[in-house]
Image (tube, grey):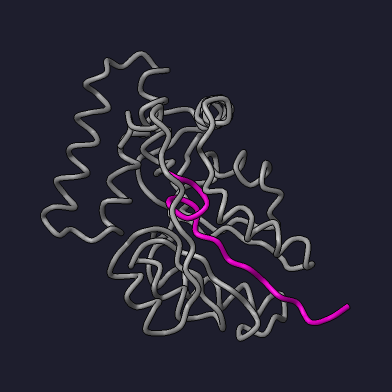
Amino acid sequence: MGPTRIAYFDVDGTLTTDTSLFRFLDFYLAATGRPPRAYQQARQELKAMTAMGIPRVETNRAYFDNLAGARAADVASLARAWFQQELHHGGYFNDHAVRALRQHQENGDLTILVSGSFPALLEPIATWLGTDETWCTSPQIRNGRYTGRLSAPPMIGQRKADTVLLSASVHRADIRNCTAYGDHVSDLPMLHTTGRAVVVGGDEALRRIAQCRGWRLLPAAPLSPCRTKGA
């Protein structure tokens, strides 16, 4: 066997064509009997935080307020049902990024998800993709229920980079032979960490950086009409 190589993938907007956190929140609120305006209100509050310049780390924390009091088993069950619905509708995955992931798998590389999303939501995605590990945000669960808080800082920004370095060390992989995939400027620390980086999608600021650094570019897959509701 040759030296270990690892491909690290952001999920939302990189492997997927939309933000799974919001797609699931829409599904979750409807499935638990909330009116449609509940999702719109939650989404607008998070958008307002972003518009005010509040860092993505903090908007990620705020997202999990929506799960406060929910039974962890119920959230996991609904996440699996949500994912099956996404597969049924089609257009959920970015075929360009998934094709790259499959190529890494065929080459014998480890494939690892590094995401600001959370375990219940990522488990069916990781199973379907056949990836090796998942590193993500950890919502706090006590007595089987979400508290609305986090157990550790969200898996965003520099924390992704630190996690990639730790993972490479654990697997005794040369970070220079590893590859990172991301779609947002918050992925830059991770993209800078590995020897190779790939930018997915149309983030203009990130694409300019990629062009300057000679990083590979992959296009964003177009959203199908049925995917516009959670935008």
Q: For residue 125: magenta?
A: no
Of 151 and 54, which appears nearest the observer? 54
Q: Quadrant of the C terminus?
A: top left
Q: Position of residue 148 (x, y in %)?
A: 35, 40
Quadrant assignment, res 34: top left
Q: Quadrant of the N terminus?
A: bottom right
Q: Residue at x 41, y 76 (%)?
A: 189
Work out whether 187 lies above or below 202: below
Q: Left or right: where does residue 16 sit relative to residue 207? A: right
Q: For residue 16: magenta?
A: yes
Work out whether 231 lies above or below 52: above
Q: Main secondary structure of the magenta part?
A: loop
Magenta residue span: 1-17
Quadrant assignment, res 203: bottom left
Of 123 and 111, which appears nearest the observer? 111
Quadrant assignment, res 180: bottom right
Q: Position of residue 56 (x, y in %)?
A: 28, 58
Q: Position of residue 110 (x, y in %)?
A: 71, 65
Work out whether 204 lies above or below 61: below
Q: Residue at x 71, y 75 (%)?
A: 5
Q: Residue at x 70, y 80 (%)?
A: 173
